[in-house]
Amino acid sequence: MESPNQSAAQEFIFSAFPYSWGSSVTCFIPLLFIYTFIVIGNLVIITVVQLNALLHTPMYFFIGTLSFLEIWYTTATIPKMLASLLGEKTISLNGCLLQMYFFHSTGISEVCLLTAMAFDRYLAICSPLHYPTIMTPRLCAQLTLGCCVCGFITPLPEIAWISTLPFCGSNRLEHIFCDFLPVLRLACTDTQAIIMIRVVDTVHAVEIITAVMLIFMSYVGIVAVILRIRSAEGRHKAFSTCVSHITVFLLFFGSVALMYLRFSATYSLFWDTAIALAFAVLSPFFNPIIYSLRNKEMKEAIKKHLGQAKIFFHKTEDLK
C-alpha cells in the first residue's frame, strides 16, 4: 500500500542509457542510421510489391504487410530512444503505457503473421494443386486482419491492469524502453505485482510457444514433402521459397524467447539491454535485407523500378 509520504510517480527515467555526451552521440548515430534504413527499406518493399504485378501473390502480400508492421513496431520505441540519447531520459506514465501497448500489439501481430506465412508456405509446397483455390486474396486479407486483431487485443488487459497500479518510490526504469517486467518491478503493490509478473510471463510463454509449435509443424510437413522430390533442382527451388521466412523466424523468435521465456531467471542490465536491442532493433534491421537481397524476384523488381526512377529523373533534368 502507498504510504502517506510517498507520491505516485507520474514519469519514469530510463537508467540504461549512457549519460556522457560522447557515449550518447556514439550510440545515437548508428541507431539513427538503423532506424532510417528500416523505414526506407520496408517502404521500398511495400512500394515494389504494390507496383509489380508479378508480386501480387499471397507470399508477397504477407511480406508487404510484415514490412508495414515492422515500420510501426520500430517507431514505437526507436524515436524515443533517439530522443533519450540526446535529451531528457524521461517518459510520462501515459506515454510509457502507450509505448508498451503499441510495441507489444505490433510485435504480437508480427508473430501471428509469421505463423500465417508458415501456413501459406505449407499449402504452396504440400498442396500446390489446391493452393490457388485455398489461398485466395480474400483468405489472405482475413488472415492478416485476424493477426492484427489478435495483436491489438491481446495486450489490452495487461495494459489496463498496469494503468491501475500505484507507482511510488524509485521511478528509475532499468531498460531502454517501457516493457512489462521493468515497469511492474516499480509498482508499490509487491505481492500483487509478483503474481502478475508470473501471469505476464505465462501469457507471453503461451503466445510464443504456440506460434513456434505451429510454425515447426508446418515445416515438418514442408521438409517431408521436399525430401520426396526426386530432382536436386526441384528440392532447391522448393526450399528456397522458405529460406527468407525461416531466417526471419529464427532471428526474431530467438531473441524474443530469451527475453520472455526466462520466467524467474534474471539478467544483468547489460544483457537485458543487449537482448532488447536484438529483437527491437537488430531483427527489424535485417528483415529488409533478408527479404530483398536473398529473394531473386524481389531483387529483380527493385532493380527494375530503380532503373525506371533513374530514367524518369534524367528526363526531368533534360526538360529543365
Image (cartoon, rainbow, N blue to C red):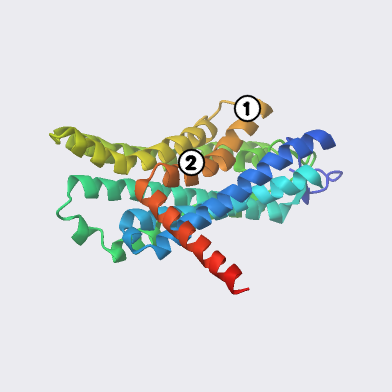
* Residue 18 falls in image quadrant: top right
Extreme residue in the front direction? 318
Can I make out residue 17 in this image?
Answer: no
Provide the residue designation for mark 2: 204
How far apart are labels 1 and 2 at the CA level?
Answer: 19 Å
Which one is in front, 25 or 102? 25
Considering only order in the chain, which callout, 2 or 1, is on the residue closer to the N terminus? 2
Residue at the image position 39 percent from the left and 47 percent from the top: 114
Residue at the image position 72 percent from the left and 46 percent from the top: 82
Counting from the top left corner in percent of width and height, residue 105 is at 52, 53
* Residue 64 falls in image quadrant: bottom left
Counting from the top left corner in percent of width and height, residue 198 is at 54, 36
- Decide: is 170 above or below 160: above
Provide the residue designation for mark 1: 271
Can I make out residue 6 in this image?
Answer: yes
Secondary element type, mark 1: helix
Secondary element type, mark 2: helix
Label disc, if present, on residue 173 of the rendered structure: none
